[in-house]
Image (cartoon, helix red, strand yellow):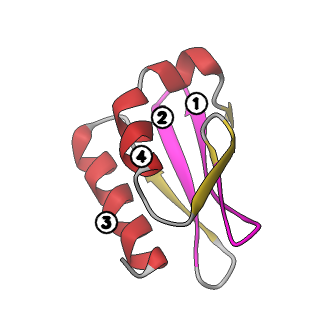
Amino acid sequence: MRHARDADLDRIEDLLAQVRTLPGLKEKKRGCFYWKSRGFLHFHEDPKGMFADLAGEDRMDIRIDVTETDGQAELMAAARKRLGV
């Protein structure tokens, strides 16, 4: 599993647009989001699909398959919960 490249991120641009609307996040590099100066969310590409690593409260990442819309909705819900919005 490798970090997503621009061509990979192109496939989930609609999801990235949704993430960009979340309050308090800064996108330091395309697809790499920070919250309160800490890594919050980034993406990986794998032969099985696209995956998001979302920082958990206990500093353990939560990996979510965002290849399909169900996983993308799950990611958005988890990110909102983590941000308290």
Distance from the alpha carbon under mark 2 to that under mark 1: 5 Å
Predominant SS along the magenta part: strand
Residues at marks 2 and 1 touching, judged by CB atoms closer than 8 Å: yes
The span picked out in magenta is 33-56
Q: Say which residue label 2 marks.
A: 50
Amino acid bearing label 2:
Met
Q: Would you say 9 lies left or right of 81 here? A: right
Q: Quadrant of the N terminus?
A: top right
Name the residue tied to disc 4. Answer: 65
Q: Which residue is mark 3?
A: 77
Looking at the rendered structure, which numbered label has been put on residue 45? Answer: 1
How far across and down, in percent of the image, does residue 24 sit?
Answer: 55, 66
Alpha-carbon span between mark 2 and mark 3 = 17 Å
- The quarter of the picture where residue 61 lies is bottom right
Mark 3: which secondary structure? helix
* Residue visible at 63% across and 54% down in the picture: 26
Q: Residues within 10 Å of mark 3 (few under 14, many from 20)?
A: few
Q: Position of residue 15 (x, y in %)?
A: 37, 39
Name the amino acid, label 4: Asp
Q: Earlier in the sequence, mark 4 or mark 2?
A: 2
Q: Earlier in the sequence, mark 4 or mark 3?
A: 4
Which residue occupies the foreground of this view, 23 or 83?
Answer: 23
Name which residue lies at 57% across and 30% down. 46
Tag 3: amino acid: Ala
Q: Is residue 37 magenta?
A: yes
Q: Please give left or right for residue 8 compared with residue 49 in the image.
A: right
Q: Earlier in the sequence, mark 2 or mark 1?
A: 1
Q: Are marks 4 and 2 in contact (CB under 8 Å)?
A: yes
